[in-house]
Image (tube, rainbow, N blue to C red):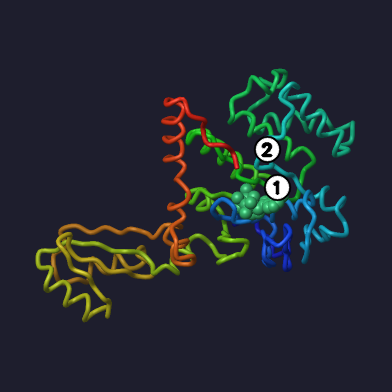
């Protein structure tokens, strides 16, 4: 968050999308600061892609609008497009062209000045470590390389805002962390505002702020840390030489409600990090072991929607395992949705 200015580079007002009688996006409003890494987290069908596609001017708006870098998405599409780079949920490279040819094509479409084209292309290929493969056909690339090439392409015209719709969907864990490294690097080095969607809770953790989306609405919006604090802070668990006395002391000294079971004592505090050190020093009972666990974004989703994100969305690791199982069993792998 170091380089954030205080300028709202994205201001969304009552953005709405209806398909017939079905409302996919129900009048959402929020803003994003310049330099922020901002994420939409939500299950499939929540309306994330629909929102992002309207903001990128590739889908018409039913009601409301958004202002991107000072330009209205309904009135000034061309200026908005100049300011943004987009990586769509579904792959959009020409597989029968080389990496270099794909990037050149994009430069033509985005009217990148001829005199700087090759320099920019080399720059983004360097950044995504694809320079050695620039003359290979895209169809020979791995999933992760294709995604990197799409990121490279999205950066070609020096966008102020980079939109990434499910940037790592369907990629293996190692490639996912590789892609994330590029996203973080780009944000830091270029001070680009990054707006992404994901249904992976662990990825939402990387964001400066996260909006949880469900059924076309923004349920809650804050930093991952604040969202988790809202769940009830950190859980402290400990064992002592005299649990009975410890429970009494914790009640007396801190006024906390303590649970005692066969695993020892547990209670929750707003910030475990701040609480822990003085607590260990002050408690007049010998502590045998102590640990802290944080609520996850899944706990946050549960608190605000009443359901677990996991109930409907397999975690990425589960999904990978499931995909392998399916492919071994000769079933179709999960489709991209
Ligand atoms: N062209 C369309 N016509 C009708 N319904 C659509 C269309 N596109 C998306 N939807 C519906 O809108 C909802 C939101 O979809 P989407 O934005 O793709 O969700 P997400 O990206 O969060 O998974 C879903 O219920 C989806 O079925
Ligand atoms: Mg989507």
Q: Nearer the viewer, residue 247 or 144?
A: 144
Q: Would residue 33 be found to the left or right of residue 101 on screen?
A: left
Residue 64 at x, y percent in the picture: 77, 66
When the figure is inspected, residue 154 is found, relative to residue 215, above or below; the finding is above
Residue 268 at x, y percent in the picture: 32, 69
Mark 2 element type: helix
- Which quadrant of the rendered structure holds the N terminus? bottom right
Q: Would residue 259 be found to the left or right of residue 229 on screen?
A: left
When the figure is inspected, residue 328 is found, relative to residue 231, above or below; the finding is above
Q: How many other residues sit within 10 Å of disc 2, few (<14), some (14-19) or many (≥20)?
A: many
Q: Nearer the viewer, residue 61 or 143?
A: 61
Q: How many marks?
A: 2
Rendered residue at 58%/60% (across/down): 213
Q: Nearer the viewer, residue 307 or 179?
A: 307
- Which quadrant of the rendered structure holds the C terminus? top right
Q: Which residue is mark 2?
A: 151
Q: Which residue is mark 1?
A: 162
Mark 1 element type: strand
Q: How many other residues sit within 10 Å of disc 1, few (<14), some (14-19) or many (≥20)?
A: many
Asked whether mark 2 lies closer than 8 Å to ligand 2, one says no
**Distance between mark 1 and mark 2 Cα atoms:** 9 Å
Q: Residue furthest left?
A: 242
Q: Is residue 195 visible?
A: no
């Amino acid at each position: 968050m170091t380089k954030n200015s205080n300028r709202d580079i994205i201001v969304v007002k009552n953005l709405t999308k209806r398909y017939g009688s079905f409302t996919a996006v129900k009048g959402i409003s929020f803003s994003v600061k310049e330099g922020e890494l901002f994420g939409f987290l939500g299950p499939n069908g929540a309306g994330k892609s629909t929102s992002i596609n309207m903001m990128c001017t590739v889908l018409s708006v039913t009601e409301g609008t958004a202002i991107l870098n000072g330009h209205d998405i309904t009135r000034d599409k061309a200026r908005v497009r100049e300011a943004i780079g987009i990586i769509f949920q579904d792959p959009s490279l020409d597989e029968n062209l080389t990496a270099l040819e794909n990037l050149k094509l994009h430069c033509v479409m985005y009217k990148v000045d001829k005199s700087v084209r090759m320099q920019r292309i080399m720059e983004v290929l360097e950044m995504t470590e694809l320079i050695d493969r620039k003359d290979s056909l895209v169809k020979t690339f791995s999933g992760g390389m294709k995604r990197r090439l799409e990121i490279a392409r999205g950066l070609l015209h020096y966008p102020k805002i980079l939109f990434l719709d499910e940037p790592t969907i369907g990629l293996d864990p190692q490639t996912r962390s590789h892609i994330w490294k590029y996203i973080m690097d780009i944000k830091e080095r270029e001070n680009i505002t990054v707006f992404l969607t994901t249904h992976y809770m662990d990825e939402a953790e990387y964001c400066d702020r996260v909006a949880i989306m469900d059924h076309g609405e923004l349920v809650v919006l804050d930093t991952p840390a604040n969202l988790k604090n809202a769940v009830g802070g950190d859980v402290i668990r400990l064992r002592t030489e005299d649990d009975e006395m410890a429970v009494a002391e914790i009640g007396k000294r801190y006024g906390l409600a303590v649970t005692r079971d066969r695993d020892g004592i547990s209670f929750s505090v707003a910030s475990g990090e701040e609480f822990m050190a003085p607590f260990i020093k002050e408690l007049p009972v010998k502590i045998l072991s102590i640990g802290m666990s944080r609520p996850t974004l899944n706990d946050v989703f549960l608190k605000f929607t009443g359901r677990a994100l996991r109930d409907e969305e397999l975690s990425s690791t589960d999904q990978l395992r499931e995909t392998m199982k399916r492919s071994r069993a000769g079933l179709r792998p999960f489709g991209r949705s």
